[in-house]
Image (cartoon, rainbow, N blue to C red):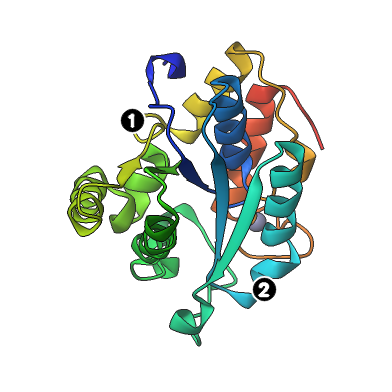
Amino acid sequence: MNMNNFEFEDVPSAVMLSGGLTSAVLLSFLREKELKSSLKAFFVIFNPKQVLKEQKCVEQLAKYYNVHLKILDVSSLYDGMTVPSSLDFQKFNDYYMPFLNSVMISVVAAHVYYIGYKNIIFGTTSSASFHYPDCSLEFLKAQSKAIFYGSVSNLKLLTPFLNSSKLEIMRMAKESNMHIPVELTWSCFVSYKKPCGKCFGCLERKLSLEILGSGE
Ligand SMILES: [Zn+2]
């Protein structure tokens, strides 16, 4: 895979961040494009506990890559929906937050429509599309259309990583000699203090760091 084949129009764009390794690769990738137009980062809170770690990581990444950050909060929508404490690959659907990605994309779309931005860049990968219905190719195609028509043809949803797995993205970052500040990212789905080491996020992070050749 070569991400340089993915051409961005140089127009004011919003980039959605989660605080994970993919967020860092996406920001590196966008910075390498040396876009002249403004780029604004967005973080959507769906669980108040995220403030402890994910939000902190997003703030650090935004600072590192010199991107203005806007934080939006939809956590009241998910009040009472808890993530199970024991997670494994088989039970992925146990912690599907209904329409979460769709909600996050929609609130960002609503915000950037008014400030006249043209693109929303969402760094979801094929790994997520396999697990979450609102990250699937079909869903995102439909959402992309909805955003385009809902914004009177002004706003596009771009998903440059959708055809690659998370590990393929890490390989691309390594091959492109990107410096990824892994210490500013967070991957655990279960804990917001110390990584649990067992959840899908932690296991995938371990493999990702091996590819990137960086330990922690
Ligand atoms: Zn974990």
Where residue 163 is drawn, which disc sits there?
1
Q: Residue 25: which quarter of the image?
A: top right
Residue at 41%, 65% in the rendered image: 107
Question: Residue 187, can we see it?
Answer: no
Q: Position of residue 189 (x, y in %)?
A: 59, 60
Q: Position of residue 40 (x, y in %)?
A: 56, 46
| Image height of 12 relative to 55, above or below | above
Around disc 1, counting alpha carbons within 10 Å, would you say few (fewer than 14), some (14 to 19), or many (20 or more)? some
Q: Quadrant of the C terminus?
A: top right
123 relative position to 26: left or right: left
Residue at 17%, 54% in the rendered image: 149
**Local SS, label 1:** loop
Residue at 55%, 34% in the rendered image: 26
Which residue type does callout 1 highlight?
Answer: Asn
| Image height of 31 relative to 183, above or below | above
Which residue type does callout 2 highlight?
Answer: Lys
Q: Residue 24: which quarter of the image?
A: top right
Q: Residue furthest bottom?
A: 80
Question: Residue 174, can we see it?
Answer: yes
What residue is disc 2 on?
49
118 relative position to 170: left or right: left
Q: Position of residue 50 (x, y in %)?
A: 65, 67
**Local SS, label 2:** helix
